[in-house]
């Protein structure tokens, strides 16, 4: 009986705070990836973990079965390609998996944006969704950078090991630095396609902060004034 009640509480919490779970999982993924990066099995486990979290977020935020179906169509082949690519040593499968992951993360980010802007009230979870959407956009561009690097070798360079392909964590670091506008990254795009992607991410970062975050703050201010 106690186990059933705990499962119900977990489901209720997930339905009420999906963005909090997603943001916590994304930040946890950043911390645990260095421990998993030393083996192909660890990288596969990382991909599985991230996709399960995305699936839960889509299930809670988008109640439309068709919307969730699109997410699964992207997630399942992405995981399969990642498993085959890492464990079977097939780089072409990895590139396809990275492409699908980029689309999946961007698709989930758009779903969270609609979730945040879907009404005229602001809940705590919708405020947290602003942070979760930011991480999703950073992930989607990082995967896009991996695809770019696979298609055009030498797209990115760094202050150290300039000739080596950039790792996932390095490109994720570049993505966070670019999207936030901080620019503190030793990873530099040097090919035309790579620079185009980075400029696109700069634009997305500015527009995201200007439109989504400002609207949430405005709605929260209106609610605070109405409460007086």
Image (cartoon, rainbow, N blue to C red):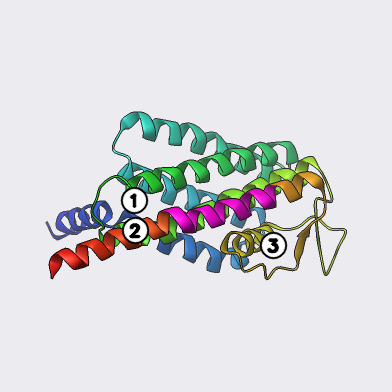
* Residue located beneath label 3 in the image: 170
- How far, Cα to Cα, is label 3 from label 1? 30 Å
Q: Is residue 112 above or below residue 80?
A: below
* Residue located beneath label 1 in the image: 116
Q: Nearer the viewer, residue 210 or 32?
A: 210
- How far, Cα to Cα, is label 1 from label 2? 8 Å
What's the residue at 67%, 67% (across, down)? 183
Quarter residue 128 falls in: bottom left
What's the residue at 50%, 58% (across, down)? 135
- Counting residues from the start of the chain, the first of labels 2 and 3 encountered is 3
On the image, the x and y values in percent for residue 224 come to 21, 67
Quarter residue 217 falls in: bottom left
On the image, the x and y values in percent for residue 91 come to 74, 41
**In this image, 205 relative to 94: left or right?**
left
Magenta part of the chain: 197-211
What's the residue at 58%, 43% (across, down)? 102
Residue 46 makes an appearance in the image: no
Label 1 secondary element: helix
Mark 3, other Cα within 10 Å: few <14 / some 14–19 / many ≥20:
some
Mark 1, other Cα within 10 Å: few <14 / some 14–19 / many ≥20:
many
Image mark for residue 188: none
- State which quarter of the image contains the C terminus: bottom left
Instruction: Give the total of numbered labels.
Output: 3
């Amino acid at each position: 009986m106690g186990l059933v009640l705990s499962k119900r509480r977990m489901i209720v919490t997930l339905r009420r705070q999906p963005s909090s779970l997603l943001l916590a999982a994304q930040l946890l993924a950043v911390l645990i990836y260095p421990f998993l990066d030393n083996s192909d099995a660890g990288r596969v486990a990382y991909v599985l973990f991230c996709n399960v979290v995305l699936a839960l977020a889509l299930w809670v935020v988008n109640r439309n079965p068709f919307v969730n179906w699109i997410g699964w169509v992207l997630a399942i082949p992405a995981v399969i390609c990642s498993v085959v690519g890492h464990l079977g040593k097939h780089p072409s499968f990895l590139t396809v998996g990275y492409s699908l992951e980029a689309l999946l993360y961007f698709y989930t980010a758009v779903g969270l944006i609609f979730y945040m802007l879907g009404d005229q009230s602001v809940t705590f979870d919708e405020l947290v969704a602003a942070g979760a959407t930011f991480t999703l956009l950073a992930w989607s561009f990082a995967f896009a950078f991996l695809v770019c690097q696979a298609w055009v070798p030498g797209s990115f360079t760094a202050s150290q090991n300039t000739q080596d392909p950039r790792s996932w964590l390095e490109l994720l670091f570049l993505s966070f630095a670019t999207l936030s506008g901080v620019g503190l990254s030793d990873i530099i795009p040097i090919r035309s396609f790579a620079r185009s992607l980075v400029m696109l991410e700069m634009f997305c970062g500015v527009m995201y902060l200007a439109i989504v975050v400002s609207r949430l703050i405005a709605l929260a201010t209106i609610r605070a004034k109405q409460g007086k």
